[in-house]
Image (tube, coloured by chain):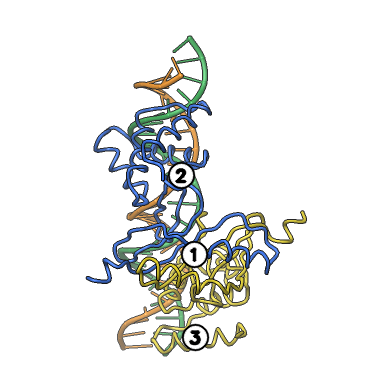
Chain colours: A blue, B yellow, C orange, D green
Amino acid sequence: MKTPQQRLDEILSKLRQREFRITPQRIAILQAFLNTDQHPSIEQVYKQVKTHFPTTSLATVYKTVNLLKEIGEILEISIADGRNRYDGNRPYPHPHLVCTRCDSIIDPEVGLLDQLTAEVAEATGYRITSHQVQLFGVCPSCQKK
Amino acid sequence: MKTPQQRLDEILSKLRQREFRITPQRIAILQAFLNTDQHPSIEQVYKQVKTHFPTTSLATVYKTVNLLKEIGEILEISIADGRNRYDGNRPYPHPHLVCTRCDSIIDPEVGLLDQLTAEVAEATGYRITSHQVQLFGVCPSCQKK
DNA sequence: ATACATGCAAAACATTTGCATAAGA
DNA sequence: TCTTATGCAAATGTTTTGCATGTAT
């Protein structure tokens, strides 16, 4: 598992490679995504960044997120509730487990997923390239309340 | 597998039971959802309904869809591309297989899903109540083109 | 007759875009 | 210096809402 600092350096050098500019806003936005495992929304990142950088605009957050999506360094997660959420730590498709009470999202290990994909590819003839697997439920902590 | 007519009758009697009114618009909207396996969007249903019923408004389609969601007779499918799509034939969570070229959606048999859910519940302690499983790929027909 | 549904327009939301200005390289 | 990024405001696209009118029961 990489540290947030390693991920940050990794992404910054990718940006430099492709001749995108390193701006303070981009660094702050990246840090907001990398220093949490909470799969934040755009709005959450915007608020977070604004505390340190009050002039930052929402449009810049959106533009930066789109840039990061394009270079493959952030994953967009759609949870059917209007606002997208993002994962900058594991920017490749993987299952999510969403607590419907506290809205938290974790990344469970799912050994059977490859088999499941293979099963469907076999049965249907589709060439499967990606997935979006969201499981919904109640986390142990919320079950106690 | 139920016929569209059976599903229609089923849903209409549920509406009557709960003292919702049976209007021509509601019937037309229901038929648009039930007479296809194409998982249509709101806009598609709206266009379809308008050919027979030119005065129908988009707002009514939305309101009817929300009513059908509330009574559990339609499933909303979010595919991260802005517009939701709907399944009136199997209104319970099930996996979808989306062709990224032609945008079609089919409902594959996925025997391993229950095991996968059990695996995650076991490992995490979550009580899993629902899911959203979308596989993306290229369908056999689009592969040939 | 009386509530509920419809249809229109306006509002609400998340997201995108255009453009003048600021600032990395 | 020269191009790209920022920030603002306006535009977009989807979905929701308020309200007067129409209509199912």
Q: Position of residue B62 (x, y in %)?
A: 46, 67
Residue position marked by numbered label 3 in the rendering: B12
- Tag count: 3
Decide if residue B42 is in sight here.
no
Residue position marked by numbered label 2 in the rendering: A74
Residue drawn at (58%, 87%) of the image: B6
Residue position marked by numbered label 1 in the rendering: B58
Q: Are marks 3 and 2 in contact (CB under 8 Å)?
A: no
**Can you say whether D8 is above or below A131 in the image?**
above
Decide if residue B71 is in sight here.
yes
Give the camera-side residue of B8 and A40. A40
Q: Secondary structure at mark 3?
A: helix
Same subunit, tags 3 and 1: yes
N-term-proximal mark, 3 vs 1 = 3
Give the camera-side residue of B76 and A98. A98
Same subunit, tags 2 and 1: no
Mark closer to the observer (2, 1): 2
Extreme-left residue of the structure? A145
Mark closer to the observer (3, 2): 2
Residue drawn at (26%, 66%) of the image: A141
Q: Which amino acid does the dot numbered 3 rest on?
A: Leu
Q: Position of residue B111 (x, y in %)?
A: 57, 74
